[in-house]
Image (tube, rainbow, N blue to C red):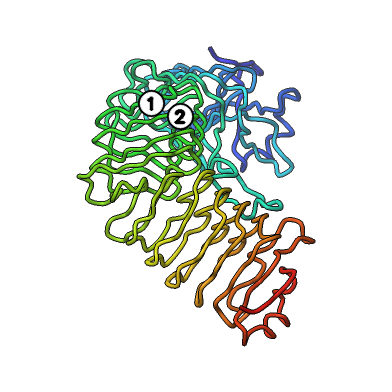
Amino acid sequence: MLNVTRKSGKVILLGVITATALVSCMKDHSDGGGGYITRPYQEDGYYCDGKLFYAMDHTTACVVGSDGGTSSLVIPDAIQINEMTYPVGIIKNLGIYQSPGEDGLFSPTPNNGLYSVQLGSNVTTIQSDSKDDMFYERVVLTPRGEEVYMPSLALSAPLKRRYPIKEMVVRYGNPIYDSRENSNCLIHYATGRVVYGGIDAKVPPAISEIAPCAFVGCENLTKDCTLPNGLVSIGYSAFQNCALTRVVLPQSLEAIGAGAFWGNHLREIVIPAKVSEIGDHAFADNDLSAISVDEANEMFDSRNNCNAIIQTDSNTLVLGCDNTVFPNEVRSIAPCAFYDCNHLKISSLPDSLESIGDHAFMDCINIDTLVVPDRTKYIGKAAFYGCKKLTHVVLPQGVKVGEGAFRNCDALTRGTVKVMFHDPDAVDPAVFGFSNPEEKAYRLLVPDEAETRFLESKWHNYFLSIVTY
């Protein structure tokens, strides 16, 4: 079990040393091959068994990395060194330990070949050795071209998997975690919280909570998914990009996190009575045609069979679909509420509307006419970006318009924008820009007494003609 050599009667163990000790030890102890460091075992030291690297304290071994030569890792119950037994109680990283960088520091890199993990019975703590999650790393989005106008969830998962783990097994006897019903999930036993789902996971029974990002990208989940009764909370991005076509939410459910079902193929959603929290973008980028809320729900409603989710007290439209009929009382439209609703057509927006959230109607390619109500004071970033058939827009006085709100609305090259305000500085005309800087919208209609001011402003850089009405 031990990977040791002997020199001058002393035991030398293959291991890894911390950044503070590394520089002084490299010259004398480098093995010259794999880039690891050999050193005598100390009570507060490090040890490698050939597949896993451990940090040691007086009583416990902590997994801090792995070797890149295996696709399957078995976390032992304990390791024995110099006739002492150390339970393996903590996992901080399963990444591959490689040679130190230019700064002389060891740091794990993602283990892209790790497909199977089996946890020992003594593992009680799973935590990252940094601020990041143990199983996920944050995607750094670098805006390029038009991506600057996209919602971040549309570009990529907010977190990506560190390892392509398919099988996640917890051995019998672990007091903290289990993987019940061969679900390939890591579950916190006492709370019923799904911490992580392998790529080949299935949603286990008898759970109360699904952690953020737990099933991100698990396209092998059952496409017609019924979540178990007893489930109370679904974390942000929990089922993002899972290719689900149908999901049945249990009556016990109370909270749905932001982006929880982003990027699936859901056609219908029924919100149960106890749900009191729905995060932004929770069901965005699906194929929804029918939306309803249980009549007993006190927080949300779908009044008059409107095919939308309305937050009752604030009259905020949280989520819509291709068949939404706007209730007259709606005061605001949430971010991404109609994102990518390809068949949505708007005959009119309610006169009560005061604000339209970021990306609210982005890529709604069948909207052709938009008269923004007089009471509307804010249109969010990229709110109507990519509405390719939009040929007629009317903007009221006093409205503030976010960056790229009407960008790349192709039909405006032959359409008309009418503004009710007199000050050309009230709205940045770049909101009507195109990816091709040579393209311009066709015609801008302005109040008679404001014609000269608009002609002398930068609006003429975005419209072929400026005339009065």
Q: Quadrant of the C terminus?
A: bottom right
Q: Nearer the viewer, residue 208 or 226?
A: 226
Q: Is residue 445 above or below residue 65?
A: below
Residue 257: x and y in percent read 39, 44
Query: What label sits on residue 442 in the rendered view?
Result: none
User: Is there CB contact under 8 Å for labels 1 and 2?
Assistant: yes
Measured in 3D between alpha carbons, the distance from the residue under mark 1 to the one under mark 2, in whole angstroms, is: 7 Å
| Dot 1 alpha-carbon crowd within 10 angstroms: few under 14, some 14 to 19, many 20 or more | some
Under mark 1, the amino acid is: Cys
Residue pictured at 36% horizontal, 43% vertical:
256
* Residue ID for mark 1: 225
In the current view of this chain or complex, which residue is farthest to the bottom? Answer: 449
- Quarter-of-image position of residue 349: bottom left
Which residue occupies 55% across, 68% down?
Answer: 394
Residue 116 spot, x, y in % from top left: 52, 18
Secondary structure beneath dot 1 equals strand
Query: Which percent across, then down, holds residue 249?
Result: 32, 34
**Can you tell which quarter of the image residue 331 is in?**
bottom left
Specify whether 90 is left or right of 415: left
Q: Quick one: which residue is furthest to the right in this view?
A: 438
Using the image as rendered, state which of residue 168 and residue 87 is in the foreground.
Answer: 168
Q: Which residue is mark 2?
A: 244
Report helix, strand or loop for mark 2.
loop
Q: Residues within 10 Å of mark 2 (few under 14, many from 20)?
A: many
Between residues 56 and 205, which one lies in front from this camera angle? 205
Circle 2: residue type = Leu
Q: Residue furthest left?
A: 296
In the displayed structure image, the side of residue 137 where residue 268 appears, left or right: left
Q: Percent position (x, y) of residue 198?
A: 48, 24
Q: Residue placed farthest to the front in the image?
A: 469
